[in-house]
Image (cartoon, rainbow, N blue to C red):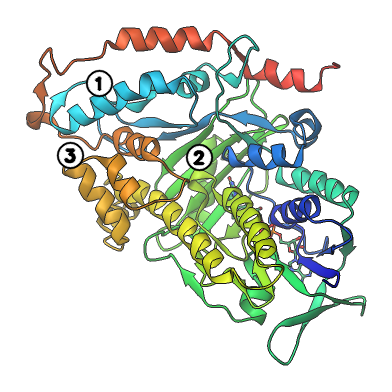
Amino acid sequence: MKKQQVVIFGGGTAGWMAANAMASKWSKEKIDITLIESSEIGIIGVGEGSTPRLKQFFDTLGIAESEWMPRCNASYKNGISFIDWSHKPGFESYFHPFISYTDRKTQSAFFYNSFARRKGFDVHAHPNRYFLTAYLSEKKLGPIPDYNFPFEVDYGYHFDSHLLGNFLREAAIKRGVRHIDARVTQVKQHENGDIAGLELETSAYVNGDFFVDCSGFRGELIQNTLKVPFISFDNNLFNDAAVVLPTPAQEQLNSQTLSTALKAGWAWNIPLQNRTGNGYVYSSSFCDKDQAEKELRTHLGLLDSEEEARHLRLKVGRVAHHWYRNCVAIGLSQGFIEPLEATALNLVANTIDDFIHSYEAGEFSNKHQAAFNQRVNSGFETIRDYIVAHYILNSRSDTDYWRANGENKNISESLKAILHCWYSGLNLGQEIEKQKIPTSYTAVSWYCLFSGYGIYPEGQQLQAATADVKRFNLADIDDFIKRCSANFKPHNELLEELTAPH
Ligand SMILES: Cc1cc2nc3c(=O)[nH]c(=O)nc-3n(C[C@H](O)[C@H](O)[C@H](O)COP(=O)(O)OP(=O)(O)OC[C@H]3O[C@@H](n4cnc5c(N)ncnc54)[C@H](O)[C@@H]3O)c2cc1C
């Protein structure tokens, strides 16, 4: 096989993640990788929370936390607290946990009690009490246990996206990726429509056999050049704008993201070592820029602050085909589901791995393109449905935005079946299995969402639980989780260890 030239267009987190993964999998004898980015255009510079998928990504590259985390002012993340999304008494907030091995012992009690409560028995069925990472987050403990506690905990990270980009750039260049800092001014196509090469502002021309579009929301190759249609999710995800405003670092760093519902969207709070990232993701149909900024400032207690806010527009949806002709789109160019569960880099990592595998398996041809596109699309749709569920299940009625979300009927058949299953007291695990929903959200996540919002019979519909229904002693669960947590250090201490000399 002739040596292949792969050209990555864009050096945001997606571009550099792709460059590292490809350079680590493909030998330099077979494939040359070039990444072109424009430091003048820059990167989007948000996207600072991850799922455990980012840990897997770094582990596969063999990059240790002590190498990258201090350089990116990173912190650990046990999960996300959702605050004020529901106004049901007792369910005003809940925690969506990353899972730990020890949850196996407690989650059966949660499933059982949750099931009993759906049947109308008054048992404790709020998720926070059943998951180790909920407790760790409440106590600001990190997710890595002492060596004598051999049970793993899944966790994600918070990080500065500019610094992460710098780190990944260095790592990719060390792996042999050629880096060009210049604006692409024109895309040339072959007669058959394939991409031939990129013309740069310097008049240089970079040709390639295969192109990776990581140009961000612009989608320069996949959307603008190849005209792959964009499928908007705006009829069921209303948020299309964000305003961003940092605050000083927390003294004792949270080990979780906070997501607080506001009048026309929600605000994130992401603890980094040198600052706290904050932003308000909202719908411009219900709130203008100035109102959003004022509401965020009020929420943060920053009404009088001189700190300038950054405003962003979001393009929510996905392209119809992520791999088309000799181009694959990765990152914001392929689509974006709003950042509520911090899933974008999850999708980026999945797309990269799947593409590398599919391209190789087809001997560097488009043989497996259709199956790849189908898998990536279904990854997008299932995450979208989980995010949509946060909005339609909300029990707020204080603003037009929340009422419109609650009344929205534009939902997929898959989500309809999940909702029906929950409301009818049927087995949710079986429904998820039946639908073959890909791994992003398991039954635990769905149970936490429904239960965390308090989607249960209420008031008169609830009856006292009889002794045979009360199968689990909550004090035992509390005690078990508390004893497990004794093996975990304060978050700050864990972060300090990353920089301590070994
Ligand atoms: C408000 C908000 C919050 C988010 N929160 C999260 C989160 O918590 N977790 C998460 O996982 N994700 C989050 N995301 C998504 C995350 O920001 C992105 O997935 C991630 O940063 C990757 O972006 P990217 O690399 O695709 O695009 P970008 O960062 O925009 O990079 C695009 C690259 O293309 C280059 N480029 C463009 N045009 C040209 C040209 N003509 N010539 C040369 N170079 C060019 C740019 O210079 C840049 O290098 C969030 C996004 C938004 C908008």
As drawn, the residue found furthest toward the bottom would be 191
Task: Give the image quadrant in which the ligand numbered 1 is located.
Answer: bottom right
Q: Point out residue 40 in the picture as x, y percentages from the top left corner.
A: 82, 63
* Nearest to N terminus: mark 2 or mark 1: 1
Q: Amino acid at mark 3?
A: Gly
Q: Nearer the viewer, residue 95 or 320?
A: 320
Query: Real-space Cα distance between discs 1 and 3?
Result: 17 Å
What residue is disc 3 on? 425
Q: Is residue 459 above or below residue 8?
A: above
Q: Point out residue 209 in the picture as x, y percentages from the top left corner.
A: 78, 75
Q: Is residue 45 above or below residue 458?
A: below
Query: Real-space Cα distance between discs 2 and 1?
Result: 35 Å
Q: Residue at x 33, y 33 (%)?
A: 452
Q: Residues within 10 Å of mark 1 (few under 14, many from 20)?
A: some
Nearest to the eye among marks 1 and 3: give it: 3
Question: Is 199 placed left or right of 451 in the picture?
Answer: right
Q: Point out residue 489 in the picture as x, y percentages from the top left corner.
A: 62, 13
What residue is disc 2 on? 298
| Picture quarter with the N terminus | bottom right
Query: Real-space Cα distance between discs 2 and 3?
Result: 41 Å
* Nearest to N terminus: mark 1 or mark 3: 1
Q: Is residue 166 above or below residue 205?
A: above
Question: Is 239 placed left or right of 409 in the picture?
Answer: right
